[in-house]
């Protein structure tokens, strides 16, 4: 009887010990891409946040269907916050970030570029300086002391490049206004809230649907200053398309930042003109956190390449109200050395990006 009691007591002790051991075992962290640990897809807030979320969800769904991985769309409050998030979560973040953001994120925490945007055949874009069409401003030198509106201090085309342009021209603007985005900057010029604004520029399309000039023309020096803006004889005809999705000028299509306010200001081209362009800037990127699992990254890259060839792409990141990527190309880190040189020249750090 005593043996049985002793055996029972020992059995209970063993079970209790095993239970305690099981409780003490750390819970495994869910893998990136699982339902419990979705991959974060980060978008900088350069256009309307609602448009980003709606289009981003389409992209996330397409990637989920192609890879079986789970994604969540996030729009941080600023360019700087996007970089901070990628650095804080290096194993589960992928970000659609501009060249400046990529260079700083790469420098800070090893974020790695995978793709660059293509827009109507262009792997590059430009900064445009916008001024009221009826202003007397005819040269960059006249901007000295004037009120400058820019989207965000983390914007490559909206802030970084024009800052270097002005430094090189020994121009010091007067009051500066961070508007919160490229559309807001174009609107600030339109409303007269600022004397000049800096935003992204893309080449307009001819009535045949082709860029007025090509990247090869640009490299060959065939693009003259009068080809930056629309032909003078079509400007008065600029208006919304019938469905409101385009800003058309006698068949010519506006693709620069002015088109982003076409609904609220359909006469924006009649009221706001382009003063000058910057040198070419490498297009924005899709980049991954430094510790992102290579196997998952390869799956996502393959899925993105395929998704870019579908009609749904045009309702997602290819939508003009979103980022307007008409395609993607593989990108390499050395392509952004031009941006690195500008960062070094201007002494830009993460702390400068609107914080």
Image (tube, grey):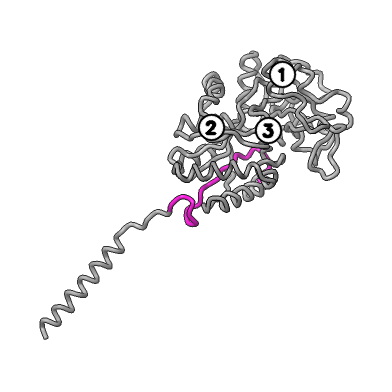
Judging by the rendered image, the residue that carries numbered circle 2 is 102
Is residue 168 visible from the viewing direction of this image? Answer: yes
Local crowd size for mark 1, using a 10 Å CA cut-off: few (<14), some (14–19), many (≥20): some
**Real-space Cα separation, disc 1 to disc 3, in angstroms:** 30 Å
Residue sticking out furthest to the bottom? 1
Residue at the image position 11 percent from the left and 86 percent from the top: 1
Callout count: 3
Identify the mark nearer the N-term, 1 or 2. 2
Task: Depth check: give the residue in front, 198 or 34.
Answer: 34
* Percent position of residue 180, x then y: 66, 37
* Percent position of residue 15, x then y: 24, 71
Local crowd size for mark 3, using a 10 Å CA cut-off: few (<14), some (14–19), many (≥20): many
Task: Depth check: give the residue in front, 266 or 285.
Answer: 285
Which mark is nearer the camera, 2 or 3? 3
Which mark is nearer the camera, 1 or 2? 2
Quadrant showing the C terminus: top right
* Percent position of residue 2, x then y: 10, 83
* Percent position of residue 135, x then y: 81, 22
Question: In the figure, 302 relative to 105: above or below?
Answer: below
Label pair 1/2, CB-CB below 8 angstroms? no
Instruction: Say whether residue 44 is magenta.
Output: yes
Residue at the image position 49 percent from the left and 42 percent from the top: 298
Judging by the rendered image, the residue that carries numbered circle 3 is 119
Residue at the image position 76 percent from the left and 22 percent from the top: 228
Identify the mark nearer the N-term, 1 or 3. 3
Q: What stretch is highlighted in magenta?
A: 31-49
Taking the image as shown, residue 127 lies to the left or right of residue 235, namely: left
Identify the mark nearer the N-term, 2 or 3. 2
Please, what secondary structure does the residue beneath circle 1 have? helix
**Real-space Cα separation, disc 1 to disc 2, in angstroms:** 29 Å
Task: Depth check: give the residue in front, 298 or 141.
Answer: 298
Judging by the rendered image, the residue that carries numbered circle 1 is 143
């Amino acid at each position: 009887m005593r043996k049985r009691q002793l055996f029972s007591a020992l059995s209970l002790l063993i079970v209790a010990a095993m239970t305690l051991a099981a409780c003490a075992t750390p819970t495994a962290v869910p893998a990136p891409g699982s339902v419990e640990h979705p991959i974060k897809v980060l978008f900088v807030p350069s256009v309307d946040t609602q448009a980003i979320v709606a289009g981003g969800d389409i992209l996330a769904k397409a990637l989920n269907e192609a890879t079986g991985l789970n994604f969540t769309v996030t729009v941080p409050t600023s360019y700087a916050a996007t970089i901070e998030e990628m650095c804080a979560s290096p194993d589960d973040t992928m970000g659609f970030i501009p060249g400046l953001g990529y260079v700083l994120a790469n420098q800070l925490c090893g974020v790695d570029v995978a793709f660059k945007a293509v827009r109507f055949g262009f792997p590059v874009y430009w900064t445009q300086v916008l001024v009221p069409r009826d202003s007397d401003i005819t040269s960059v030198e006249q901007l000295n002391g004037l009120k400058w509106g820019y989207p965000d201090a983390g914007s490559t085309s909206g802030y970084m490049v024009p800052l270097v342009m002005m430094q090189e021209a020994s121009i010091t603007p007067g009051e500066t206004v961070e508007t919160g985005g490229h559309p807001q900057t174009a609107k600030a010029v339109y409303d007269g809230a600022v004397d000049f604004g800096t935003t992204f520029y893309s080449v307009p399309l001819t009535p045949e649907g082709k860029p007025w000039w090509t990247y090869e023309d640009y490299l060959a020096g065939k693009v003259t200053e009068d080809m930056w803006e629309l032909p003078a004889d079509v400007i008065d005809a600029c208006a919304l398309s019938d469905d409101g999705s385009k800003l058309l000028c006698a068949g010519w299509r506006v693709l620069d930042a002015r088109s982003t306010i076409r609904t609220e200001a359909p006469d924006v081209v009649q009221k706001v003109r382009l003063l000058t362009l910057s040198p070419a800037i490498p297009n924005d990127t899709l980049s991954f956190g430094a510790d992102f699992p290579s196997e998952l990254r390869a799956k996502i890259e393959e899925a993105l390449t395929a998704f870019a060839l579908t009609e749904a792409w045009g309702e997602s990141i290819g939508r003009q109200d979103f980022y307007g990527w008409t395609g993607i190309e593989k990108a390499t880190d050395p392509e952004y050395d031009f941006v690195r040189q500008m960062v070094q020249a201007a002494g830009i750090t993460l702390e400068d990006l609107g914080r």
